[in-house]
Image (cartoon, rainbow, N blue to C red):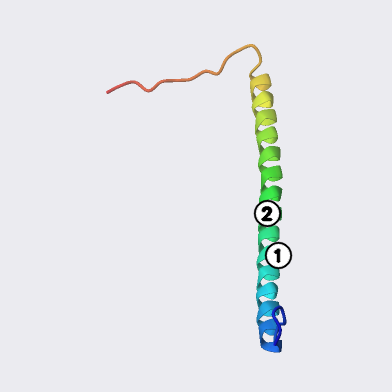
Amino acid sequence: MEHGEVTDRQLEALLGRLDRVVEELARLNAREERREELTVIAHELRNLNESLQAIAYAALGTQGPQVRRRRAG
């Protein structure tokens, strides 16, 4: 056998390893896509929270919130 030749057994082993690498890359890509989707959702939730806070403060008008304190004792 000359240097650089690959036996059928070695070729099968290499192909098996490549298949596992492809599967792992597919899993990593899917995980990254989900992470990116969650980032978009988190951004939208922040925007929604800010909007809701603005609406709540606008509903109070010029009068601030009235907070009653409990009496000690």
In the image, 45 versus 17, the foreground residue is 17
The vertical placement of 34 against 1, above or below, is above
Label 1 element class: helix
Q: Position of residue 40 (x, y in %)?
A: 71, 43
* Horizontal arrangement in the rendering, residue 71 relative to residue 7 (left or right): left
Q: Identify the secondary structure beneath mark 2.
A: helix
Q: Are marks 2 and 1 in contact (CB under 8 Å)?
A: no
Residue 21 is drawn in which quadrant?
bottom right
Identify the residue at horizontal 66%, vertical 35% (top origin).
46
Q: Which image quarter is the N terminus in? A: bottom right
In whole angstroms, how far apart are the C-alphas of marks 2 and 1?
10 Å
Amino acid found under the numbered disc labelled 2? Glu
**Residue at the spot 67% in from the left edge and 30% down from the top edge:** 52
Callout 2 crowding tier (Cα within 10 Å): few <14, some 14–19, many ≥20: few
The residue furthest front is 2
Sequence-first disc among 2 and 1: 1
Nearer to the camera, 48 or 37:
37
Nearer the observer, 12 or 40: 12
Which residue has dot 1 on it? 26
Per the rendering, the mark at residue 32 is: 2
For badge 1, the amino acid type reads Ala
Please name the residue shown 67% across and 21% down the image.
59
Q: Quadrant of the C terminus?
A: top left
